[in-house]
Image: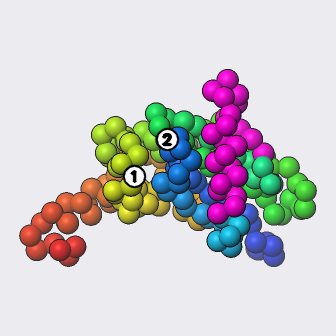
Amino acid sequence: VHFPTKPRSKMISFILMVNKQGQTRLSSYYQWMPMEERVALESEIIRKCLSRSELQCSFLEYRGFKVIYRRYASLFFIVGTKADIDAGKGAENNENEMGMLEFIHSLVETMDKWAGSICELDIMYQLEEVHFLLDEMVMNGYVVETNKANILRPIDLLEREAKTADGMFR
């Protein structure tokens, strides 16, 4: 049995949910990065995504990241991926852009099923639940589940338990 000696890179490095004004409403990182670098990277990527027209494609390369984004109503969903470490320095990022767009669409559809029609306020006021939902879909940078029923079942159980009089979340 062969075990790789180098750490494998993550399929997804980060996920951002941003409004039209450029305010981050959710960020989830799957690759360690100092906070100063995160803040700078987020602001630069958000500025780049928001400044692009609807006629331009939804993919861009920035600072070694392949950035895939999609706008739904007033929210931008942004996913960043990086080239595999095992491929060596300067290697090409072979992440499937269409697959990432499909993941974004699946995320939005799942959030819509959970909250009705998802909006910025749902994310702001139910941030913990949105993180739970995202954690059911992405683990350690890899997409692990896309079935809406499987994703929403544990969240539904948590919400039902919270409503009971003798629930553990009271």
| Numbered range of the magenta stretch | 39-61
Return the x and y of residue 162 as percentages of the image width and height. 20, 66
* Quarter location, residue 166: bottom left
The quarter of the picture where the C terminus appears is bottom left
For residue 105, say whether it is visible: no
Q: Is residue 92 above or below residue 113?
A: below
Q: Amino acid at mark 2?
A: Leu
In depth, the one of 10 and 55 nearer the eye is 55
Return the x and y of residue 140 as percentages of the image width and height. 59, 65
Q: Residues within 10 Å of mark 1 (few under 14, many from 20)?
A: some
At x 71%, y 38%, the residue is 59
The quarter of the picture where the N terminus appears is bottom right
Asked if disc 1 and disc 2 are in contact, CB closer than 8 Å, the reply is: yes
Q: Amino acid at mark 1?
A: Ile
Q: How far is the residue under mark 1 from the one under mark 2?
A: 10 Å
At x 42%, y 39%, the residue is 109
Q: Which residue is mark 1?
A: 123
Q: Which residue is mark 2?
A: 75
Extreme-front residue of the structure: 21
Going from N to C along the chain, the mark reached first, 1 or 2, is 2
The question of residue 56 being in magenta is answered with yes
At x 81%, y 54%, the residue is 64
In depth, the one of 131 and 137 nearer the eye is 131
Q: Is residue 106 above or below residue 33?
A: above
Q: Is residue 113 left or right of residue 87?
A: left
* Quarter location, residue 154: bottom left
Q: Residues within 10 Å of mark 2 (few under 14, many from 20)?
A: many
In depth, the one of 22 and 75 nearer the eye is 22
Extreme-left residue of the structure: 165
Element at label 2: strand
